[in-house]
Image: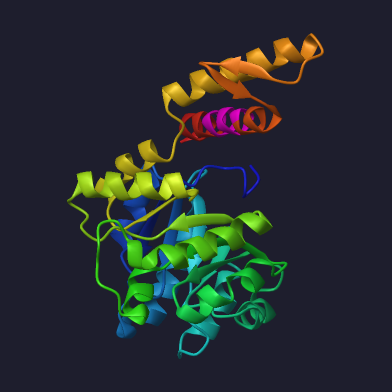
């Protein structure tokens, strides 16, 4: 399945140093996994975590879950070794932390070669350079690092995330302009499923493809929020059928539920049905 066409409703961070967590991830109903060598691993475990992850991915068992490896930055003692190792791990993409410019992507690509790259968007400089980062020929996805971004911006937490909306919007515009996957940041209160549902709905309404998660209890909420609902699917089918009918009569506009349906609505309807079908395929193969 093409990287940009597959579902990314739930993207779970897993510490690469924790063998039990790596094993459990093989059974979780997530669309993608971020195998984390960076923030989730203590400094004294960095080298061992790299070897643990290499062994886990070599053993396989992750099915059709999209495999993302987040390396340490090249400005750290572990970044180069991470980048060299990820080339041989069988991961789908390498995730680079704190990307501030296209030059940061070039530096990693000089080590990882033609491997697709995702960028952690989590600094003010990254926000200002989002368009040039998204346009890099190896760039395939953005992950919002909202915790680090909030720290850098010195914002206060608000349930509506208003202090972050400019940054989220800049990255969304850049990602959509270049056809990238873009994943929303984490929701820290992992036991607050109601709050998570609200934030997932906000992200979905804005145009994010899915949500990064920090605990398995969050998976079901994200999967539901970022999947087409039964109502969405029904409406999409009726829009396509109505448009096809009027088009066969030489007309260009249909009406469904009292609303006009044009080419652009039909294109969206087809995307909804394609996403629903891709989710069904993933679930059947898991």
Name the residue furthest left: 191
Q: Residue at x 40, y 75 (%)?
A: 38
Q: Quadrant of residue 27?
A: top left
Count up the numbered dots: 0
Q: Residue 69 or 203: which is nearer the viewer?
A: 203
Q: Is residue 90 something one can see in this rendering?
A: no
Is 31 colored magenta in this rendering?
no
Name the residue furthest right: 250
Q: Residue 258 or 84: which is nearer the viewer?
A: 258
Q: Main secondary structure of the magenta part?
A: helix
**Left or right, 54 with reference to 5:** left
Q: Quadrant of residue 136?
A: bottom right
Q: Report the coloring of the rendering.
A: rainbow
Dividing the image into 4 quarters, which one contains the N terminus?
A: top right
Q: Residue at x 49, y 59 (%)?
A: 57
Measuring from the top left, give residue 32's x and y in whole percent: 46, 51
Q: Residue at x 17, y 51 (%)?
A: 191
**Left or right, 67 with reference to 43:** right
Looking at the image, residue 262 lies above or below residue 127:
above
Is 271 colored magenta in this rendering?
yes
Measuring from the top left, give residue 131's x and y in whole percent: 63, 69
Span of residues in magenta: 269-277
Measuring from the top left, give residue 264's x and y in whole percent: 67, 33
Measuring from the top left, give residue 267's x and y in whole percent: 66, 32
Q: Is residue 119 something one can see in this rendering?
A: yes
């Amino acid at each position: 399945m093409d990287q940009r066409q597959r579902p990314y409703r739930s993207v779970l961070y897993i510490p690469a140093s924790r063998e039990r967590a790596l094993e459990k991830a093989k059974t979780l109903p997530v669309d993608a996994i971020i195998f984390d060598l960076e923030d989730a691993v203590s400094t004294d475990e960095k080298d061992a975590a790299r070897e643990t992850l290499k062994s886990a991915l070599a053993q396989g068992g992750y099915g059709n879950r999209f495999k993302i490896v987040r390396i340490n930055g090249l400005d750290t003692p572990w970044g180069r070794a991470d980048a060299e190792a990820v080339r041989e791990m069988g991961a789908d993409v390498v995730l680079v932390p704190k990307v501030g410019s296209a030059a940061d992507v070039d530096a990693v690509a000089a080590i990882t070669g033609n491997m697709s790259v995702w960028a952690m968007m989590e600094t003010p400089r990254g926000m200002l350079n989002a368009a040039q980062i998204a346009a890099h020929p190896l760039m395939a996805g953005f992950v919002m690092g909202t915790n680090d971004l909030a720290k850098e911006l010195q914002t206060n937490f608000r349930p509506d995330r208003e202090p972050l909306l400019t940054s989220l919007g800049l990255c969304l515009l850049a990602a959509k302009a270049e056809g990238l996957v873009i994943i929303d940041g984490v929701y820290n209160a992992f036991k607050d499923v109601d709050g998570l549902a609200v934030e997932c709905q906000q992200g979905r309404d804005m145009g994010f493809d899915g949500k990064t998660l920090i605990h398995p209890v969050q998976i079901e909420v994200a999967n539901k929020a970022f999947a087409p609902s039964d109502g969405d699917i029904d409406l999409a089918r009726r829009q396509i059928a109505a448009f096809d009918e009027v088009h066969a009569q030489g007309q260009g506009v249909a009406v469904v539920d009292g609303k006009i349906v044009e080419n652009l609505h039909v294109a969206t309807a087809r995307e909804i049905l394609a996403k629903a079908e891709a989710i069904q395929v993933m679930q059947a193969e898991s």
